[in-house]
Amino acid sequence: MDSLKGEIPKYFLQPGYIFISREPYLIHTVLGSCVSVCVWDSRSKIGGMNHYIYDKTRKIRNTRYGEVSLPYLIKIMLKEGAKKENLKVHLLGGAQNPNLGSSLGKANADFAISYLRKINVEIISEDLGGELGRKVVFNNLTGEIIVYKLNRIRSEDWY
């Protein structure tokens, strides 16, 4: 962190990745049909975010799939000292492309909601579905998010 300016470092989260830190970060990503789960424990001051592309695995099990990424995100948070009863979650993404007619975005969003309810983790906000992409900025120190709605995702949105 640049102590002279007081700026919080930024981290761009690529699709299929997870980022968790005790240090303050502005974690940002860009979503279409993908889903990101922002998790925060205000007491232990730890926060993290994932970005998954598909709800369920096809052949290879990795964090591109929600059924791998989301449990792993929660597991790492708890391993780093977060308490399950203190976790708060923002759910974002899951847009539908009307030209493609795909139900991928809805399946991604439905998986996150179902899994978090099953393990009894509190969802404090949802910005899911629709036809617009999103650029998301998550402050892992405060648990705050900013969501920019995008008519189309441009290359400059990625970084």
Image (cartoon, grey):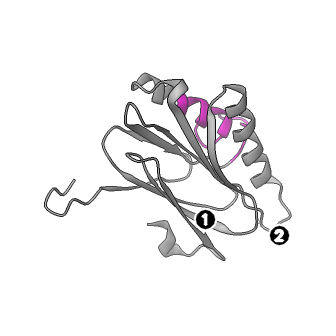
Residue to which mark 1 is pinned: 134
Residue 6, magenta (yes or no):
no
Q: Nearer the viewer, residue 82 or 20?
A: 82
Q: Nearer the viewer, residue 99 or 81?
A: 81
- Range shown magenta: 54-74
Q: Residues within 10 Å of mark 1 (few under 14, many from 20)?
A: many
Residue to which mark 2 is pinned: 98
Residue 118: quadrant of the picture: top right
Residue at the spot x=50%, y=56% of the render? 145
Secondary structure category for the residue under label 2: loop
Residue 136 against residue 67 in the figure, above or below = below
| Location of residue 119 in the rendering, given as x and y in whole percent from the top left corner | 67, 25
Secondary structure category for the residue under label 1: strand
Residue 23 against residue 115 in the figure, above or below = below
| Location of residue 29 in the rendering, given as x and y in whole percent from the top left corner | 51, 58
Residue 69, magenta (yes or no):
yes
Q: Amino acid at mark 1?
A: Arg
Residue 37: quadrant of the picture: top right
Residue 69 horizontal side relative to residue 42, left or right: right
Residue at the spot x=43%, y=66% of the render? 159
| Location of residue 66 in the rendering, given as x and y in whole percent from the top left corner | 66, 39
